[in-house]
Image (cartoon, grey):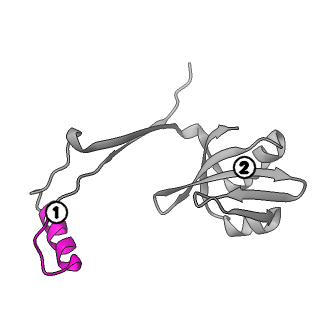
Amino acid sequence: MKDYQVQITETLQRVITIKAKDAIEAKRITETLYKEEKIVLDFNDHIETQILSLIDFCTTKQLIERLKVISPKILECNLQISGLNATHHIFIKGNKIYDEGIDGKITQWNIESFMENYVSNQWIIDYIE
C-alpha cells in the first residue's frame, strides 16, 4: 500500500447586515468583528466541499505533455493563482492549444506562448472529456 495526500477544502459563507455610512466602513466593521471573533462561521454556513487528490497537481509543462497524449480530448483544469482556482477547458490540436476560460472565451495559443504565460503556475486536472 502507498500513501497518498488528499486535499479537503470546505467553503463557508455568510451574508450579514451592517449599519454604516458607506460600503467601505461596512467592510472595515465586518473585518474588525471577524478578527475579534464576534462573527464565527460554522457548519451552518457550509456551501461547498472539494476533495482533490494532490497527485492531480501538475506544472504547465506537465499539463502540455498530458494534452499531447490524450489529444483531441479536452481536460478540465483549475489554474492555481495566488490561492484561487480559475477553471479552464483545454485541448491541443497540432501546435495550438485552445483554452476556454470560465467566461466562455476561447483563447488560441502556440505551445511556446502558453508556456511563457503560465510558466510558474500549478494546475489541477479535474477530468477528461
**Residue behind mark 2:** 62
Q: Residue at x 76, y 44 (%)?
A: 66
Lower sequence index among marks 2 and 1: 1
Q: CA distance from mark 2 to mark 1?
A: 40 Å
For label 2, count other residues whose C-alpha is less than 10 Å away and answer few (under 14), some (14-19) or many (20+): few
Q: The residue tagged with tag 1: helix, strand or loop?
A: helix
Task: Give the vertical position of 105 relative to 123 (above or below).
Answer: below
The residue shown at (21%, 72%) is 27
Q: Say above or below: 74 vs 26.
A: above
Q: Amino acid at mark 1?
A: Lys
User: Residue 71's x, y, as percent?
Assistant: 83, 43
Q: Amino acid at mark 2?
A: Gln
Which is nearer the eye, 15 or 52?
15
Q: Quadrant of the N terminus?
A: top right
Residue 70: image location, x then y, percent? 80, 39
Q: Which residue is mark 1?
A: 35
Q: Is residue 81 magenta?
A: no
Q: Main secondary structure of the magenta part?
A: helix
Question: Are circles 2 and 1 on residues that touch, CB within 8 Å?
Answer: no
Q: Magenta span covers which residues?
A: 17-33
Q: In the displayed structure, does residue 98 sit left or right of residue 24?
A: right
Check disc 1: other Cα within 10 Å, few if <14, some if 14-19, many if 20+: few
Query: Is residue 122 rendered to the left or right of residue 15?
Result: right
Helix, strand or loop at label 2? It is helix
The residue sitting at 78% across, 41% down in the picture is 73
Q: Position of residue 21 (x, y in %)?
A: 13, 81
